Amino acid sequence: MRDLRTIPAVATPVEPGPIPAAAGAWRRIEPTVLGIAGIVAVLAAWEALPHIVTLKEGTKLFFAPPSAVAATLWAMFAGGTVWAPLGVSAAGFGMGLGLAILIALPLGVLLGRSPTLNAMLDPFVTAFNATPRLVFLPLVLLWFGLGLWSKVVIVLFGAMFPLLINTYEGVRNADRLLVTVVRAFGAGEWQIARLVILPNALPYVIVGLRLAIGRAVLGVVVSEFFGSNEGLGVIMVQAASQYKVDVVFAGMIIFTALSLAMTGLVKLVEKRLSGWRPQRASE
Amino acid sequence: MSADTAPQPGVLRGNRKLLLGCLAVALFFAAWQAVFLFVPLDPVFITKPSLIAAGLARLVASGELFDDLGVSAVPFLYGFVGAVLVGVPLGIVMGWRARVGYALDPLMTALYASPLVALAPLVVIFLGVGVAGKAIIIFMLSVFPFIFNTYAGVRTVDRLLINVVRSLGGRERDLYVKVIFPSVLPYVVAGARIAVGRALIGVLVGEFFAASEGIGYAIARFGDMYALDSMFACILVITVLAVLFTEGIRWAERAAFPWRVGQ
């Protein structure tokens, strides 16, 4: 899957002539300012809504303004009630993603190097990648029971395929000329992999990892919704059934923050690792 | 590119990949079936291909399968069409008006990154278990690929082409019909490919939570009943549908926008 958001904006209109200093500074910060303004505007409208129109009693039950969500979030962290379920969710996330990396990277390299193996496994990879992993949840629950292992398997299923496919693409796109040169100088398969193929595949793997993190978070949420007895997702479902909307939103914010933080971390690593690269891989 | 793959005699080579793929799938099911010649089958834990085929035949013959698929298809269509109708115009405005793009991009990115599935219980409580609730969940999940892909597509529209149309006396309408629409369309279709998968997740989430019919409900119910043959049959149907949808769109992309292949 291609992350189209990384495509640079080539069509931004260019103002002719010199720009005054003040205007230049505004142009630099304009996207940030407008971006923050957009989020603030939505939050403000949300907060103001019950003050402008009177909500029906039934609707009020489902309405949690941002201030209430923030207060709940603060209470969850200050009271320490968030840590235990968060730890459970994080364990499922970490184990699933770790296993996905352990399986997908070697398998991706193998598939990239062996056309026969790739042709044989391709139908399975395509099928698993296209199918929503959620469909296996009842089966996974049947096999692994409620709790950690079901969650790990669902996270693994979700996170594995973007990694596998991207690693495969990266390995396959290795420069044949470089491979031939290194081989001509007497390198073995292992050295070819280390010197040419892995450095070439790295940007692809990183993009795969970013996609995998999103899928893994989704996997944690979904598996906790339907088949778990502890974790942040469980807290959210219970809160929803008790009409505690603020808790649901607080949980969502925590999950989003985790997802964004992990993705940001990966981006940072990518920048450090691929500084030598003249152009960035587009996939 | 493929300097060291010398041309080989035609037909076999062209179909080699397909043949190997079919062979592997056939081997997989044969091995699955054969294992239970040696290992006793525990029907509440695992099933085998012959039983799945029988289960599938039963579901098809009784019409249950098509009833369930039909029930799931309605909210799927509403949610997906809604996502196109909202996502594409929003993406165009975000891409075409730079300030709108600046203002909405972080908000949309945060929403896209958040596990929106988490709102499913609220939606179900608020709108009930009917078509509306499911359609909203599907819409929430599938709208973002449309927004972001259209946004990216509009931003890559060639400024030069626009200037050419303008200086040759083209109107605003010509701009949209002759330049913007053709350059954005491939991005929208690519977005649709991603969105279809997410919409299927929406169907399943909606129906796992609370439903009394539909394909997702059928899977959950057969799981609860330990009817593994029927459950696998439904899983297989969803897998086939998912592959047909995504590969179908991929094929359409290749056929309709050949210049984009390999980008």
Image (spheres, rainbow, N blue to C red):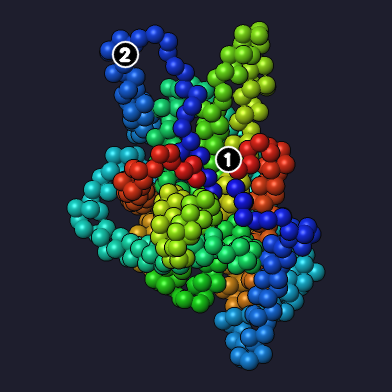
Q: Position of residue A279 (x, y in %)?
A: 43, 39
The amino acid at mark 2 is Ala
Q: Which mark is residue A23?
A: 2
Q: Quadrant of residue B54?
A: bottom right
Residue drawn 52% across the image and 50% down it: A177
Q: Position of residue B234 (x, y in %)?
A: 66, 66
Residue drawn 27% across the image and 48% down it: A73
**Depicted A165 relative to depicted A47: above or below:** below
Residue drawn 52% across the image and 76% down it: A142
Q: Position of residue A147 (x, y in %)?
A: 40, 71
* Subunit bearing disc 1: B
Q: Regarding mark 2 in the picture, which secondary structure is present there? A: helix
Q: Mark 1 or mark 2, which is nearer to you?
A: 1
**Depicted B248 relative to depicted B160: above or below:** below
In the image, A63 versus B8, the foreground residue is B8
**Disc 1 to disc 2, how far (Cα)?**
36 Å
Q: Residues within 10 Å of mark 2 (few under 14, many from 20)?
A: few
Is B129 on the left or on the right of A152, as rendered? right
The residue at which mark 1 appears reads as B263
* Subunit bearing disc 2: A
Is B143 on the left or on the right of B61, as rendered? left
The amino acid at mark 1 is Gln
Q: Residues within 10 Å of mark 1 (few under 14, many from 20)?
A: few
In the image, B153 versus A57, the foreground residue is B153
Q: Which mark is residue A209?
A: none
Q: Position of residue B105 (x, y in %)?
A: 43, 33
Q: Regarding mark 1 in the picture, which secondary structure is present there? A: loop
